[in-house]
Image (cartoon, rainbow, N blue to C red):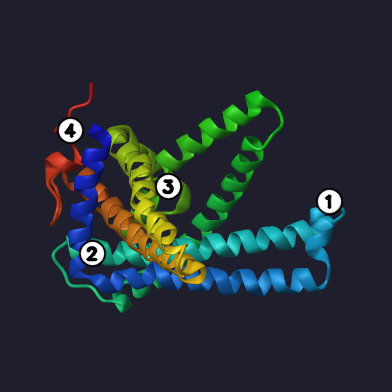
Amino acid sequence: MQLLERTWRLYKQSFNVLAADTEILLFPVISAMAAILVAAGFFVPMYQDGTLREIGEQTATWDDYLFLFLWYYCNYFVVVFFNSALVACANIRLSGGNPGLGDGLRVALHRLGRIAAWALVAATVGLFLQQLSDNRNRALRWVGRALAVSWTLITYLIVPVIVVEDRGVFESIHRSSELFRKHWGEQVTGSFGFGLLNLLLAVPGMLLGWAAWPWDRGAAVILAVVYILILAAVSSAVKGIFTVALYRYAIDGAAPFGFTANSIDPSGGRRG
């Protein structure tokens, strides 16, 4: 309960920052639309020429799997690029500025090489960890899941590091890992607390759809889907803002605009 209460306070503070720059919400929306277009660009031709069927039957050749990985990478790139633009806008706002969409996109374009490199590393490591987690060997599955959690935490602040500090990918990973060792509790709260809270916030949408189901099943589905999509966009923006707030707290030692130090770090920076 304590984790959930603290996460809710951070969520509200992040949402208040978002309310001052609602255009930031467009980044998750554009990211989702771009990801759908990228997926269509890959999977429609793969379906038409039978490649998807061959992959499903495990009769595909190595170049088919390479093409599939290319989609996986492009999808990662799209997500990281627009997340970087969101982080750039959040950083300007938490510094006292008044950002626009163009400001975020401009910073992301200036970091394009760094973003592309990080997307490649993230996609490669993510695929490897997924293979471990899906392994039939129980021990390897647990190892894969443990490594996935560790990877998520040590790279939690890598996008703010890349965007704000303009470091190379491996230097940024080291920097993010260094910040994690100092503020591991806050990053656990952000990584898992926000995920748990989002699940709870999704419940009203499910109940709304369930309540409307007896009268109009089509409308019930639409209501639930629209609610979930809006929640996903808001949650993505809120989490991005919190990530920047945590990064700035780790760097400056003080809570940024819109946040309280006690909410971000109840320990007051003490680590036992």
CA separation in Å, label 2 and label 4:
26 Å
Residue under pointer 3: 171
Q: Looking at the picture, how far across and down is residue 245, in whole percent?
A: 23, 52
Question: In the rendered structure, which amino acid carries the disc numbered 4?
Answer: Gly
CA separation in Å, label 2 and label 3:
30 Å
Residue under pointer 1: 58
Tag in front: 3 or 1: 1
Mark 1 or mark 4, earlier in chain: 1
Mark 3 or mark 4, earlier in chain: 3
Q: What element carries label 1?
A: loop
Residue under pointer 2: 18
Mark 2 or mark 3, earlier in chain: 2
Q: Looking at the picture, how far across and down is residue 18, in whole percent?
A: 23, 64
Q: Looking at the picture, how far across and down is residue 114, in whole percent?
A: 46, 60
Tag in front: 1 or 4: 1
Question: In the rendered structure, which amino acid carries the disc numbered 1?
Answer: Gln
Identify the residue shown where x is 19% and y is 46%: 9
Can residue 179 be seen in this snapshot?
A: no
Identify the residue shown where x is 62% and y is 59%: 72
Q: Which of 109 and 262 is in front in this view?
A: 262
Evaluate if marks 3 and 4 touch, with contact meaning CB atoms under 8 Å apart: no
Evaluate if marks 1 and 2 touch, with contact meaning CB atoms under 8 Å apart: no
CA separation in Å, label 3 and label 1:
38 Å
**Residue at the right extreme, as displayed:** 59
**Residue at the front extreme, as displayed:** 214
